[in-house]
Amino acid sequence: MPPTRLSPTQTPTGILFALAAILLWSSLAALGVSLRHVPPFLLTGIGLLVGSLVAVPLSRGQWSHWKVPPGTLVIGVLGLFGYHTMLFAAFHYAPPLQANLINYLWPLGMVVLAPLYLRGLHWRWQHIVAALVGFAGAVLALLDGGQSAASDDAFPQRWIGYGLALAAAFTWSSYSLLCQRVPPFRTAAIGSFCLGAGILSLIMHVLFEPATALDTQDWLLVAALGIGPAGGAFFVWDAALKRTDARTVGLLAFLTPLLSTMLLLVTSGQPFTINIGLATLLIVGAAVVGMRSGSR
């Protein structure tokens, strides 16, 4: 089979960075659900402050690498703050698998919104088909394990969670695209986003949430959250966005709901099913189609 042709803005290194971020993000739902007893603002605040530490070795002690223009800082802080607080709150109100599904509308959002946010990009029918097929696979995978959980929640409460998850999805797809419209900045500057969003989250915790004590296990899980999906993943994701087409990254990201769902199924003890297998074919197939049609 001939190698995949990449567009001028699309490199193998960028795809590898995107896959690394996807692997880290696949653990976000499992960690978030394990920490559902921690208030969302507090969880976001501590997790992102831990995540900001990843920028220290990247900057090599040069704090100027953390600096970005004010407008860029606002986009970064609000993007990380809004996404995490709404997603963690969604896990409080809605069944995790369904909330996770709605959250993973964000790759579809990137594909559909890219021509609106970024100049020079246009839709091709392959992008739309691949996005819809990938989303169908995500629906199939997540619905397979979420029916029983949904019946345990009050109807209005579930829909609050679904709305928060949808808002989180829109926030993250918009953040990812807007980051490509601002002046280029060093990857270490993501530390400023994490730091600012973490401080903002803790301020909101003090103002609106009850004081909560964390035990040793909570601290270990929050540390893993910060180093991995709520911290380190952003740095490799930023590197991916700077090296490849936003639509390709968005389509590859359809692998995340599959991996995330499988992790939730493993940790919950639920069996692997035919639906999960079919979802694997749909999601991976959509990613392949998206990569091969990644030209503008």
Image: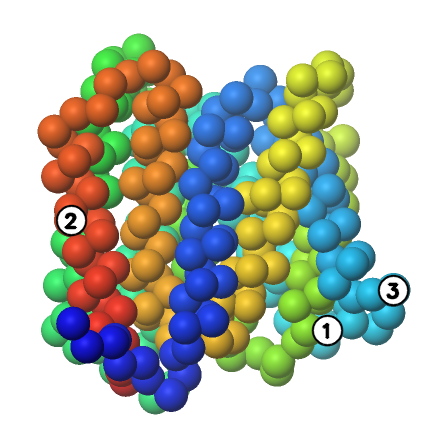
Q: Which mark is residue 61?
A: 3
Circle 2 — which element? helix
Q: Position of residue 181 (x, y in %)?
A: 51, 79
> CA–CA distance between discs 2 and 1?
39 Å
Q: Position of residue 54 (x, y in %)?
A: 72, 52
> CA–CA distance between discs 3 and 2?
45 Å
Of the 4 image quadrants, the one containing the C terminus is bottom left
The structure residue drawn at horizontal position 76% and vertical position 50%, both measured from the top left corner, is: 53
* Amino acid type assigned to the residue bearing label 1 in the image: Val
The structure residue drawn at horizontal position 49% and vertical position 62%, both measured from the top left corner, is: 17
Circle 3 — which element? loop
| Badge 3 or badge 2: first in the primary sequence | 3
Q: Mark 1 points at which residue?
A: 68
Q: Quadrant location of residue 79? A: bottom right
Of the 4 image quadrants, the one containing the N terminus is bottom left
| Badge 2 or badge 1: first in the primary sequence | 1
